[in-house]
Amino acid sequence: MTASTFEYRDGDYLLPPPNPADRVELDLGIDPRDRRRLELHAALTAAGIPPRPEDREAIDSLSALPGSITATVQRWLYHAL
Protein backbone atom coordinates (compact mmCIF):
# COMPACT_ATOMS: atom_id res chain seq x y z
CA MET A 1 0.00 0.00 0.00
CA THR A 2 1.22 3.45 -0.74
CA ALA A 3 0.72 6.72 1.04
CA SER A 4 -1.58 7.83 -1.78
CA THR A 5 -3.94 4.97 -0.90
CA PHE A 6 -4.50 6.55 2.48
CA GLU A 7 -4.37 10.23 1.50
CA TYR A 8 -6.31 12.43 3.81
CA ARG A 9 -5.73 16.09 2.95
CA ASP A 10 -2.96 18.62 2.63
CA GLY A 11 -0.44 15.87 1.91
CA ASP A 12 -1.16 14.13 5.21
CA TYR A 13 -2.21 10.50 5.13
CA LEU A 14 -3.54 7.79 7.40
CA LEU A 15 -1.29 4.90 8.29
CA PRO A 16 -2.41 1.41 7.29
CA PRO A 17 -3.55 -0.88 10.10
CA PRO A 18 -0.77 -2.98 11.66
CA ASN A 19 -0.22 -6.50 10.43
CA PRO A 20 -0.42 -8.93 13.38
CA ALA A 21 2.06 -11.24 11.63
CA ASP A 22 4.69 -8.50 11.90
CA ARG A 23 4.45 -8.25 15.69
CA VAL A 24 7.55 -9.02 17.67
CA GLU A 25 7.09 -11.40 20.57
CA LEU A 26 8.64 -9.77 23.61
CA ASP A 27 9.64 -11.57 26.75
CA LEU A 28 9.38 -8.88 29.36
CA GLY A 29 10.55 -11.18 32.09
CA ILE A 30 7.13 -11.54 33.67
CA ASP A 31 6.93 -14.61 35.85
CA PRO A 32 4.40 -17.13 34.43
CA ARG A 33 2.45 -17.05 37.68
CA ASP A 34 2.17 -13.24 37.51
CA ARG A 35 1.13 -13.45 33.86
CA ARG A 36 -1.62 -15.94 34.74
CA ARG A 37 -2.76 -13.68 37.59
CA LEU A 38 -3.02 -10.70 35.23
CA GLU A 39 -4.82 -12.81 32.62
CA LEU A 40 -7.33 -13.98 35.24
CA HIS A 41 -7.95 -10.38 36.35
CA ALA A 42 -8.50 -9.39 32.71
CA ALA A 43 -10.80 -12.34 32.00
CA LEU A 44 -12.92 -11.64 35.07
CA THR A 45 -13.18 -7.96 34.23
CA ALA A 46 -14.09 -8.69 30.60
CA ALA A 47 -16.80 -11.06 31.84
CA GLY A 48 -18.29 -8.24 33.91
CA ILE A 49 -16.97 -9.58 37.22
CA PRO A 50 -14.43 -7.04 38.42
CA PRO A 51 -12.25 -8.68 41.08
CA ARG A 52 -12.70 -7.34 44.59
CA PRO A 53 -9.86 -6.98 47.07
CA GLU A 54 -11.16 -10.00 48.99
CA ASP A 55 -10.86 -12.10 45.79
CA ARG A 56 -7.08 -11.73 45.78
CA GLU A 57 -6.42 -14.96 47.68
CA ALA A 58 -8.54 -16.99 45.26
CA ILE A 59 -6.91 -15.40 42.21
CA ASP A 60 -3.44 -15.94 43.66
CA SER A 61 -4.27 -19.61 44.34
CA LEU A 62 -5.62 -20.10 40.82
CA SER A 63 -2.60 -18.42 39.25
CA ALA A 64 -0.31 -20.84 41.11
CA LEU A 65 -1.92 -23.73 39.22
CA PRO A 66 -0.57 -24.88 35.83
CA GLY A 67 -1.32 -22.68 32.83
CA SER A 68 -3.70 -25.26 31.38
CA ILE A 69 -5.98 -24.89 34.41
CA THR A 70 -6.09 -21.09 34.28
CA ALA A 71 -6.65 -21.27 30.50
CA THR A 72 -9.67 -23.50 31.18
CA VAL A 73 -11.07 -21.05 33.74
CA GLN A 74 -10.60 -18.20 31.25
CA ARG A 75 -12.37 -20.25 28.55
CA TRP A 76 -15.28 -20.84 30.94
CA LEU A 77 -15.53 -17.13 31.63
CA TYR A 78 -15.38 -16.29 27.93
CA HIS A 79 -18.16 -18.76 27.06
CA ALA A 80 -20.31 -17.55 29.96
CA LEU A 81 -20.78 -14.22 28.18
Image (cartoon, grey):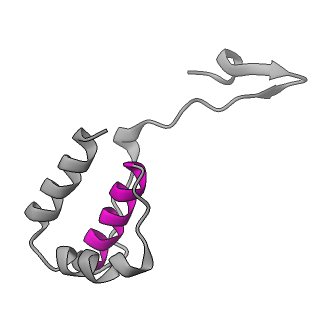
Residue drawn at (13%, 54%) of the image:
72
Residue drawn at (30%, 64%) of the image:
40
Residue lying furthest front = 54
Q: Is residue 65 left or right of residue 79?
A: left
Q: Is residue 48 left or right of residue 34?
A: right
Task: Using the rendered view, name the quadrant where residue 51 is placed.
Answer: bottom left
Q: In the rendered view, would you say 72 is above or below 52?
A: above
Provide residue 36's location: percent of width, then percent of height.
26, 69
Residue drawn at (43%, 79%) of the image:
53
Task: Using the rendered view, name the quadrant where residue 70 is placed.
Answer: bottom left
Magenta-drawn stretch, dominant element (helix, strand or loop): helix
Counting the numbered discs, the total is 0
Provide residue 76's location: percent of width, then percent of height.
18, 48
Quadrant occupied by the N terminus: top right
Q: Nearer the viewer, residue 64 or 29?
A: 64
Q: Nearer the viewer, residue 69 or 3?
A: 69
Residue lying furthest right = 10
Provide residue 64's location: percent of width, then percent of height.
16, 80
Q: In the rendered view, would you say 80 is above or below 36?
A: above
Provide residue 31's location: percent of width, then percent of height.
27, 81
Residue drawn at (35%, 58%) of the image:
44
Task: Using the rendered view, name the quadrant where residue 35 is placed.
Answer: bottom left
The stretch drawn in magenta includes residue 42: yes
The stretch drawn in magenta includes residue 73: no
Q: Nearer the viewer, residue 50 or 74?
A: 50
Quadrant occupied by the C terminus: top left
The magenta segment is: 34-47
Q: Nearer the viewer, residue 48 or 11?
A: 48
